[in-house]
Each structure stands twice: as C-alpha cells, then as structure tokens.
Image: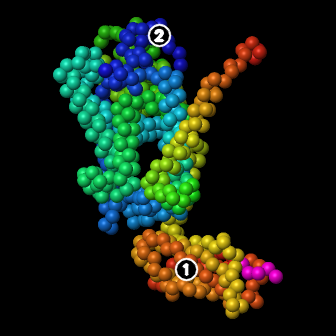
Amino acid sequence: MASDEYRGARKWSRNRQAIAIVVWISFLTGAIGTMLFFAFFDPVDLTGIFDPDLEVSRDAGYAAGFFFFWVLAAVSSALTAWLVRTAPKRDAKKQQ
Amino acid sequence: MSNKTTSTPAEVMPVYQSAEKIYPREMAGRYATFSRWSTVVLLGLFYLVPWLQYDDRQAVLFDLPARKFYLLGLTLWPQDFPFLALLLIIAAISLFFFTALLGRVWCGFACPQTVWTEAFIWMEQWTEGTRSQRMKLDKAPMSWNKFRRKFSKQFLWITFSLWTGYTFVGYFTPIREYGVELVNFQVGGWALFWTLFYGFATYGNAGYMREQVCKYMCPYARFQSAMFDRDTLIISYDESRGEPRGSRKRGVDYQARGLGDCIDCTLCVQVCPTGIDIRDGLQYECIACGACVDACNSVMDKMNYPRGLVRYTTEHAVTGEKTRIIRPRVIVYASLLTILVGSLVTAVALRTPVILDVLRDRNALYRELPSDLIENTYTIKLINQSNETREFVLTVDGLPGLELAGIPETILVEGGGVKSIPVRARMPRSEIRGSREIAFKATATDNPDVSRVAESRFVGPIG
C-alpha cells in the first residue's frame, strides 16, 4: 500500500509524462478558451440554439463549455504528442 | 558542467536514486524561514479574501452566475473583458521582469504549486515526523501506529483540500450563502462539483505530484531560462571553491591534501525537493527554493568554513565579474510594465458609467405608416455600470424629423442593471432614401455628463 501511495512522487515514465502534459496543458488552454468565449456569450442566451426545448442554467452552461474546450484541446494535444513521438526517425546514414 | 571527482556521490552513498520516492529533508535556514512566511502570507490571503466585505457585499467576487465581477468599489461586467486581458498580460510581463532580475523566485516561493506543497509537507511532518521517520514508517509493516499516523495525515490533507475547494468556489459565488447552503445540504450541483474538483486537484498536486509538476508539466519551467542572463540571480555551486570534493575529518588541513571546500556530505542533494544535485550546475528542474543553500550553510558553519559554497548569486559574480542590475532586458520589461499598468489605471479611471447598445431589428427593413411616415424598430440595451439606480432619457439624432415613438419618458435602470427595450423610430417618408446613419443617445437625468452615444442605421425605401 505504501508503495502505491507514493507512486506520484517517483520519476515518471514517458507515457505518464505524456498523459500528464496533455491533460494539464489542455486544461490551461481550455480554461483560457472558456474565459474568452463566455466573456462574449452568455450561456443563457445560447440555450435553445440546438434544441428549442432545452433549458440550461448558467452554471451548467459554463461547465459544459469548459469541458468542451478542455476535451477539444486535449484531443489536439494528444494527437500532437502522439505524432511527434511516433514520427519516423531520420536515417542517420543519409544525413552524412 | 564536468565532474572533476572520480567518484560521483551516488556511487559513494546511494542516498538518492531518481527512480525512488523523494523524501525532502527538512532544513532550517534563511530560505526555509522565508518560504514559511511566504506560504503563510499567500495562503492566508487566499483563504481570507473571500470573507472580506465591502459596502455590505463580498469585496472580491467574480460572480459568474450573475456575470458581474466585484473588486472592492469597482463593478466589472462582461464587456469589461479587455481589463481582465490586460491584467493577465501585466501578470505575465511581471513574471518575466522578476525572473530576469531574481531568477525563479516565483517557483521557489510564490507559485501555488509550491505554496500548497509546502503546506501539505507541514501536515505530513506533524503526523509522520521527520524525513528519516517517514522513510522508516513507509518501510515498516502496517501497525496501529502506522495506521494512526497515515490516517491523521490523510484526514488533515482531505479536510484542508475540501476547505480549499470551498474557498476557491467562494471567489465565484457568494461564499457566505454558499457556506449556509453547504451546511444545510442544499447546494446546487455545479458548485459542489467544482468544490470537489478543485479540492481533489489540490490533494493530488500538493500531496502526491508535488515538484513532479514543475519537472514534467510546467511550461514556465522549460522556458524560464530564456529570461536568464549572466546577471540573473540563480542558485549556484561555487565550483572553483568546492572542487575537488571529498570527505575529510574535521580540522584536517584539507587544502594540503588537495581538497576543495565541498565535503561531499550530499546534504544539498537530500534536501532538494526535485532530487537534483546542484553541484552539476544549473538545471531546469531547479525551482530556486534555496533548500540546498540552507543545508550547505549549516554544514559550512559546522566545519568552520565560510558560508556560501552554494548560494544565491549571479553567473557574473561567480566568475568574479561585476553584476549589472540595470541592463537592456530589465529596462525593456520595466518600461513595458509601466506602460501597461499606466494604461490599465487610465482605462479603469475613464470607464464610462453607462453603456448603450443598439440592435436593429433584422426581420423587417422598414414599415410604412399610413401618415406617410417610415418606421424602423430597434432593440436598445442600456447598461448602468454605476452602483446607484439611475434614470436615463433616450434621444435620437441624425436625420430631419426623426423621432422616437412609444418609449417611456425616462428609463429606470438599477445599479449594475441591464435594460433591454424595443424602440420605434419614425420620420417623414420624404426625407429618407436608402440607408442612413443615425445616433442614439442616453443621458442620465441626475447628471448630463453621464451619457453615451451609440450609432445605428435607419432604412427607408430606395426609390
């Protein structure tokens, strides 16, 4: 139990690093996106554009917006990280 | 930087292996004291500020549910967003400025990650004891003592995290009302969700991830070196004085034996929260907390050597050159800061107390009335940015014979309120052809200086 408890403080594996970076950076980007978006749009004004019967409170609107931006940024970050990591290695011989 | 010793400390004494859990050793000293004070003051502010009242309401409240920000006497609305953007830019440039001058003081003493980690380490020390006690406790099999200590730690951590989450939400929703709702189990779902979310993030970040966040996840940690130059304050090991390092008995003439001042006790490594060896030179993992400086100074005192083998200094100072505080980089950051702060203050001071928005009805271009009049309809939005209730008179200007119809003589808007009203403007048909610019004006009845003009268009028949 004790060893599990402290896993977070150990040196991280590459996968763990990648996941942490993707989650955290997309969180920051998502937060900025949410701030910008809702500075100009009130969630209450936006309700009903998808479904006229749908009524969403401001709190729920903010939360939905934030998670939308977070997931969107996470998809972008994850794909970027994955492509960078799986890119074909340059042939060392050709370089010379 | 090269290691001049034949044996690295890790071989001599495997006190630290990067793959293992880091147990930062507690160390008294100047920087530890400074860090303690900075934690107390910054966390104190965080937990206290939402409870401050100003004019019978919360002094600092980013009221998201109501879309209003209260900052002492100032009330900001969504349309004031540029202020917030400017404030964030100012914060970023201040960070650059202080980094260029003082190195990573932000990381070592002010970053929320550092500050909360420090608080969590205190709780760990109260319940589980010192570094060696903690290491022994983790190795020991489960016992009543171990359970009791671990349980107390978790209890403190979780309580503190939940209170942190509650305080955080208290910046965005009135904290007193929210507290009452919490006690009565009447909390709306989202407030509770964000409380738990932030609480959990605090628990994970400060309790477990700690400096790993700085090492692996922080973008600033990676690019801060761009702000560094040879006059920036950094934590530095004086290699010319310390090397060759090696253990020796106290009182031995080590210089005769060809040794430097470093006794290779590895205390500087043991206290490092990111687990680096500062003697290998400046590394991006170093958050400039000064723990190794405190550690080394205590050893130098014991050995009767002068302090400062590891110290806060500049690269220029280490190589015996002069450190320049005022230099182009610093001047550029400082002037940018002055300009931005100046414009923010001016902009806030010149903020108009009333905002008028006019939206033309898009459904109909115009309407012909029987009495040879042309009518356009608009929706006007009147925002009273002041805190007192005001009455406004709405007028329109720009075309001959243009007048408003069917609006009240004065429009009452409460402090911080928004009024949206449909407005009809008419004018004789003979005077209008095509689309023309007109101007609406709202003027406060109590003070003619409080007014705002908004432009729109009036459309008539083309032929």
- Residue at 31 percent across and 21 percent down: it is A2
Residue A66, percent across and down? 50, 47
Residue B19 visible within the image: yes
Count of numbered labels shown in the rendering: 2
Residue B31 visible within the image: no
Residue B244, percent across and down? 45, 12
Q: Is residue B45 above or below residue A44?
A: above
Q: Specify the subunit that label 1 lies on.
A: B
Judge left or right: residue A85 versus residue A42. right
Given residues B297 and B413, the one toward you in this image is B413
Look at label 2 and name its amino acid. Answer: Thr
Residue A3, percent across and down? 34, 19
The numbered dot on residue B5 is 2
Given residues B343 and B138, the one toward you in this image is B138
Q: In the displayed image of the protein, which residue is found farthest to the left?
A: B144
Look at label 1 and name its amino acid. Answer: Ala
The quadrant in which residue B367 appears is bottom right
Q: Which one is earlier in the sequence, the residue at label 1 or at label 2?
A: 2
Queried whether the magenta region covers residue B423, the answer comes back as no
Bounds of the magenta segment:
B459-463
Which of the two discs, 1 and 2, sits closer to the camera?
1
- Residue at 59 percent across and 30 percent down: it is A81
Quadrant containing the C terminus of chain B in the rendered view: bottom right
> Taken as a whole, is the magenta stretch helix, strand or loop?
loop
- Residue at 63 percent across and 78 percent down: it is B377
Q: Is residue B57 above or below residue B21?
A: below
Instruction: For mark 1, give the secondary structure.
Output: strand
The numbered dot on residue B174 is none
Q: Which residue is mark 1?
A: B442
Spatial CA span between label 1 and label 2: 80 Å
